[in-house]
């Protein structure tokens, strides 16, 4: 389960890396954080794990100071919806310092944002706001996925000097992590790949890649939905597509995507964030340009809404990207 | 304002004041308890923040507000909403995500809107909006006031201080009611707040009353003074009520010492004020509330 | 001059519309605001024009309360770089209220953001952060332009109920506003057009539209740069392109763009914001899809950086979109 | 720390303390005046915020800081930077946008970084970073302290209060120096601040010293106490210095009453402290500073 693996990873890095400091609201034991990702940390490392007041901007700012002093702060924003309060600290402080000080400092702050809907938490506790942080110069936007080892990802991020927003979809917490292993990802054919310097992407399909006629690019919880969509389409309709799941959303490593698109000739992107200037639009722009004239269809950007996320479960389902919407897009793309 | 609520809940004609206050607190208590059990039964989903134990604040403060005034509430807004509107049907339907809910099932438990009432689950961010509403009242030059309810934990948010400063500078008719239940979700106030809440108001020269009580009559007296002070002086005032939350923060997230909770059950608002009513009267009111709520729940669940 | 016209417009609307309230830092006379857009307002309308403390989040929040009470607050953020501090108020409050309250309220807050570089103000006083607000559900993002009457735009916005971010590039303040008039825009052929419900876009060219072989989509100050680029290309190289300048950046009305692209078969977008998930990527995605297979080249998204905006003028020029970069892109697109 | 600066500017060996303090203030004053005239001549572009009139704060406070300590400054950072580093060449080159500037000409006037020193032009947002640096010092368990300079106007920003709360709660070795020059850009403090600055610190239980002075010796004595208090108690402290800015806020934006400004010229730091030096000594120091700065300017402009 993602929540257990993340919790174990945090214990591990606090244990092995004295530079790691964890900050967040209500993370102290016995409560151990709203989603229990931080359970046990204050007990084991009272000095380097601080439960903070309800001050999202302040805690990210404190993390900036720690990071510029050689520490590796990991900040939990209780609900990703509240990272909006740290927008200035991330845009005008954390990401600015290394560049505007001409490289005299690094500011490797990792901001964890438990995000996403499907829980009926309503308009201010269900959002996926990461799209607003894409393209902030110097910022890495990374997403937990059902197919990436969170410890490996966090470990890689702790080796790098860029600040990071790490998106964790709430619905993934209770999901198992299925790692690529000897050419398979669970029931699917799959492998990990990507360019040096970028976090790896996982590519998988339910038939041989050569038989896939579309590429689906999805991250986080929508990667899980997309996998289900591909499985159902393969079994029920003999429609075959390949799924590419990046861990790194920005900057984007297009290599694994292009590798697949060059086989399938068609691309669908899926994200839970609201439509309009969303993550997938950059895929449409870049892949559309890099493979101009070589795609059978325009890149299909699949997103939610736009609109607020209603607390009524029935209405929430209508707004958020779902299985049917994904299957429809993939069906079209496979034609 | 009232959305013609059931008199058995919001107050029956001819209720003496003591009875009326008890009835209204009992109504909020039983509504919240009903909601929580519906969650446990899995009938409801999403999230909620009940105000069990804090009913005296809602009722005592809102007794002194009138049509034209405005209330901005936070995540723990049911008591405020029910005390202002009496609208149990709309709120239950809203939490159930129904189309005839307060805001059509879109906002849910923490995002309510009715004439003179709004709430938002983003802590602290509601204060400048409440100040803006007060500024509108100032520009309109009437005697309405804007009231905002916040908790102890919300003092972590910087925008709260930005608002205090502007409200004091611009002399806005704003009443800031702090329901200090000693905890911010799981965190005791000593781990979240340096200094104290009085000092935070004092820093901006905002006159504040502080009361540590769950007795609706005691709170009522102080609230009356503060509401009147804002209304007449057209300047912001604070009202700090030290209270206690008897339920979970949300649904199943309580790590507080059992002894601490148990002790607070002995001095909760219904116990304290209930004693003042003859047993038969109290029994009748309890029956009224039970009857009215059961009808509503039955109707909404059918 | 934009600054004079904006100032006159604010005087006019305060005079004619009692709902209008103006808030901002240091806007009181005799100072009259950092860029003098608000000069004279506190003297003429002391009750409805408030100089605020240095509290960007707070002032936007106050505006939200005013707006939900029937007023029409216009907030000046001294430098657009600081709108980051109001991100939560805009995303989780101002734009949320109308939708999450099921239409029970409107929250028509207009946030003015003097933005942009080329003045050597350095990394935190030169940015164009509007791209991060594109695609916020319920939010209009609008930009002042050299070809749009600011009074008409503000007037139209005051008739609407959506919250707005109104981007004013600092370099436009001293520029004259050239209005489309009887088929001409200054020395160019041009007209105003667009779909009902959207603010009009201005389309212009230095030769007959029929002779243009590329469409350039640019807003704000880059529209002025693009116009120069087109003029020079026309005169010096006989390369002819058509310029489309929208006032409304999000949601985007593609009609005037498609109208031009259907003639030219090629599209270049220009913006001063940082590259990556920028305004132009949505044009690439949408126009690329709407005119799939009918464009000669991929949509060329032209933006700055990415990186910080150095205070050194020489280095700043290297980072910000400039004339040469635009001319190069247009040359390629016209082929 | 010092980037082996010219002793004629940063302090000559054997300078008696009085002379040293005067020299360092004179250095900052003349550097800023030189910069402003270069702007007027159009040699420089962009923007700058000079600290003419506030030199006593920079010098008196930073006298008591030592290698290992950290300073976080704001938009008006030249005096702090020069007092800490003595690096006139780097700062002039930086403002000129040259590659050998403090940060290669990228940051410019308000975004400086040197060992133990940083500044940022975003008001208030520097405070949590300074607190984070203090937290790092606390974790390292040495006796270093983190100092942050802010103005009266920056108290408008909410994150300042979020920081005060955390710094006090977590007992961080943070010294918050408030240079209260009575104006936020064009706005007098009475239009920007309800209550007063002392009250803002008191709200968080942070011990604060307040001095209304432009006398470097008076400020030096108080600064010594506050720096020592933070160093020894490892708790945050405040230092409020009421002062006055004699130059424009930035380059040409001063609407303050001329009489007010004129009066402050009669009690500015160099006048007050200069009186304490024999004329010949003062003349020699002035000549030192003039000579050294002229050489630097000539070299950078050539
Ligand atoms: C900006 C923001 N940060 C964090 C939260 C998560 N959260 C919801 S309630 C709560 C505790 C609030 O405590 P308090 O203000 O004392 O109110 P109480 O719950 O005690 O009534 C927190 C941290 C939030 N809703 N908004
Ligand atoms: C977040 C933010 N808002 C606004 C500004 C614009 N600004 C620059 S300096 C200043 C006034 C600051 O006043 P004060 O803090 O008293 O410092 P002083 O200039 O008097 O030294 C303002 C409003 C800014 N730099 N940052
Ligand atoms: Mg509380
Ligand atoms: Mg000042």
Image (spheres, coloured by chain):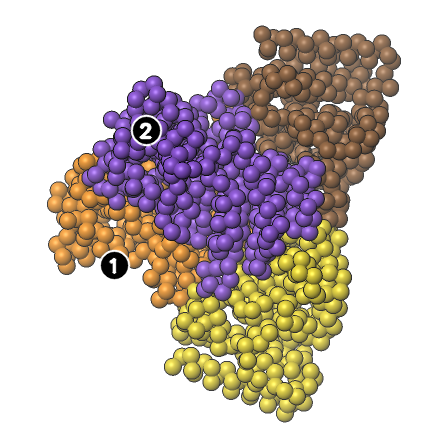
Chain colours: A purple, B brown, C orange, D yellow
Q: Is the residue marked by circle 2 packed among few (<14), some (14-19), or many (20+) residues within 10 Å?
A: some
Q: Which is more toward the observer, C56 or A193?
A: A193
The structure residue drawn at horizontal position 55% and vertical position 80%, both measured from the top left corner, is D4
The answer to whether B4 appears left or right of D38 in the picture is: right
Instruction: Give the image location of residue A256, x and y in percent.
Output: 34, 42
Instruction: Give the image location of residue A22, x and y in percent.
Output: 61, 48
Where is the N terminus of chain C found, in terms of image quarters?
bottom left
Residue C119 in view (yes/no): yes
Callout 2 and callout 1 share a chain: no
The answer to whether C18 appears left or right of B290 in the picture is: left
Q: Secondary structure at mark 1?
A: helix
- Label 1 marks a residue whose chain is C
- In three-dimensional space, the C-alpha distance between marks 2 and 1, rounded to whole angstroms, equals 49 Å
Q: Quadrant of residue A78?
A: top right
Q: Which is more toward the observer, B101 or B233?
A: B101
The structure residue drawn at horizontal position 78% and vertical position 33%, both measured from the top left corner, is B257
The structure residue drawn at horizontal position 26% and vertical position 45%, both measured from the top left corner, is A290
Q: Is the residue marked by circle 1 packed among few (<14), some (14-19), or many (20+) residues within 10 Å?
A: few
User: Which residue bears the numbered disc 1?
Assistant: C324
Q: Which is more toward the observer, C130 or A280?
A: A280
Q: Are marks 2 and 1 in contact (CB under 8 Å)?
A: no
- Label 2 marks a residue whose chain is A
In this view, B263 is above or below D192: above
User: Which residue bears the numbered disc 2?
Assistant: A207
Residue A126 in view (yes/no): no
The answer to whether C43 appears left or right of B66 in the picture is: left
In this view, B296 is above or below A107: above
Q: Which is more toward the observer, C249 or D133?
A: D133
The structure residue drawn at horizontal position 71% and vertical position 73%, both measured from the top left corner, is D220
Q: Is mark 2 within 8 Å of ligand 1?
A: no
């Amino acid at each position: 389960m993602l929540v257990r693996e993340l919790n174990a990873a945090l214990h591990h890095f606090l244990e092995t890396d004295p530079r790691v400091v964890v900050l967040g609201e209500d993370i102290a034991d016995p409560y151990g954080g709203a989603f229990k990702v931080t359970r046990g940390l204050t007990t084991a490392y009272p000095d380097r794990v601080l439960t903070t007041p309800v001050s999202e901007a302040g805690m990210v700012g404190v993390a900036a100071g720690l990071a510029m002093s050689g520490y590796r702060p990991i900040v939990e924003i209780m609900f990703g919806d509240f990272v909006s309060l740290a927008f200035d600290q991330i845009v005008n402080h954390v990401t600015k310092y290394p560049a505007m000080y001409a490289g005299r400092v690094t500011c490797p702050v990792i901001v964890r944002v438990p995000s996403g809907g499907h829980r009926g938490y309503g308009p201010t506790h269900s959002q996926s706001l990461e799209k607003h942080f894409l393209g902030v110069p110097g910022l890495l936007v990374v997403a937990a996925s059902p197919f990436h080892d969170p410890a490996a990802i966090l470990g890689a991020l702790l080796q790098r000097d860029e600040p990071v927003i790490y998106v964790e979809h709430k619905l993934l917490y209770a999901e198992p992590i299925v790692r690529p292993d000897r050419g398979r990802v669970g029931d699917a054919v799959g492998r990990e790949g990507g360019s040096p310097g970028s976090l790896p992407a996982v590519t998988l399909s339910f038939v041989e890649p050569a038989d896939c006629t579309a590429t689906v690019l999805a991250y986080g919880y929508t990667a899980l939905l997309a996998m289900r969509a591909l499985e159902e389409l393969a079994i029920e309709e003999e429609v075959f597509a390949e799924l590419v799941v990046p861990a790194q959303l920005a900057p984007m490593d297009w290599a694994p995507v292009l590798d697949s698109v060059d086989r399938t000739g068609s691309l669908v992107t899926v994200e839970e964030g609201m439509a309009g200037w969303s993550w997938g639009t950059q895929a449409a722009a870049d892949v559309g340009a890099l493979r101009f004239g070589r795609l059978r269809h325009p890149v299909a950007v699949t997103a939610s809404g736009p609109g607020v996320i209603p607390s009524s479960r029935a209405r929430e389902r209508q707004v958020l990207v779902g299985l049917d919407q994904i299957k429809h897009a993939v069906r079209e793309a496979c034609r | 304002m009232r959305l013609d609520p059931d008199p058995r809940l919001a107050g029956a004609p001819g209720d003496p004041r003591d009875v009326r206050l008890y009835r209204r607190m009992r109504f909020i208590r039983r509504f919240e308890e009903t909601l929580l059990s519906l969650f446990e039964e899995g009938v409801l989903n999403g999230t909620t923040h009940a105000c069990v134990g804090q009913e005296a604040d809602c009722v005592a403060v809102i007794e002194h507000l009138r049509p034209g005034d405005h209330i901005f509430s936070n995540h723990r807004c049911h008591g405020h909403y029910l005390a202002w509107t009496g609208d149990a049907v709309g709120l239950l339907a809203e939490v159930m995500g129904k189309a005839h809910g307060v805001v059509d099932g879109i906002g849910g438990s923490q995002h309510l809107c009715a004439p003179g009432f709004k709430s938002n689950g983003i802590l602290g961010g509601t204060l400048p909006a409440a100040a803006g509403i007060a500024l509108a009242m100032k520009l309109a030059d009437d005697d309405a006031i804007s009231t905002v309810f916040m908790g102890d934990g919300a003092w972590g948010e910087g925008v709260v201080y930005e608002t205090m400063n502007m409200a004091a500078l611009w002399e806005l008719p704003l009443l800031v009611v702090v329901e200090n239940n000693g905890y911010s979700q799981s965190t005791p106030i000593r781990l979240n707040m340096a200094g104290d809440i009085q000092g935070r108001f004092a820093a901006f020269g905002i006159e504040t009353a502080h009361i540590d009580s769950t007795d609706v009559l005691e709170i009522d007296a102080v609230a009356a003074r503060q509401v009147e002070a804002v209304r007449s002086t057209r300047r912001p005032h604070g009202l700090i009520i030290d209270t206690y939350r008897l339920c979970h923060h949300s649904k199943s997230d309580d790590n507080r010492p059992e002894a601490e909770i148990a002790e607070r059950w002995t001095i909760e608002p219904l116990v304290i004020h209930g004693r003042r009513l003859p047993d038969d009267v109290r029994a009748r009111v309890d029956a009224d509330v039970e009857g009215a709520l059961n009808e509503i729940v039955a109707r909404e669940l059918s």
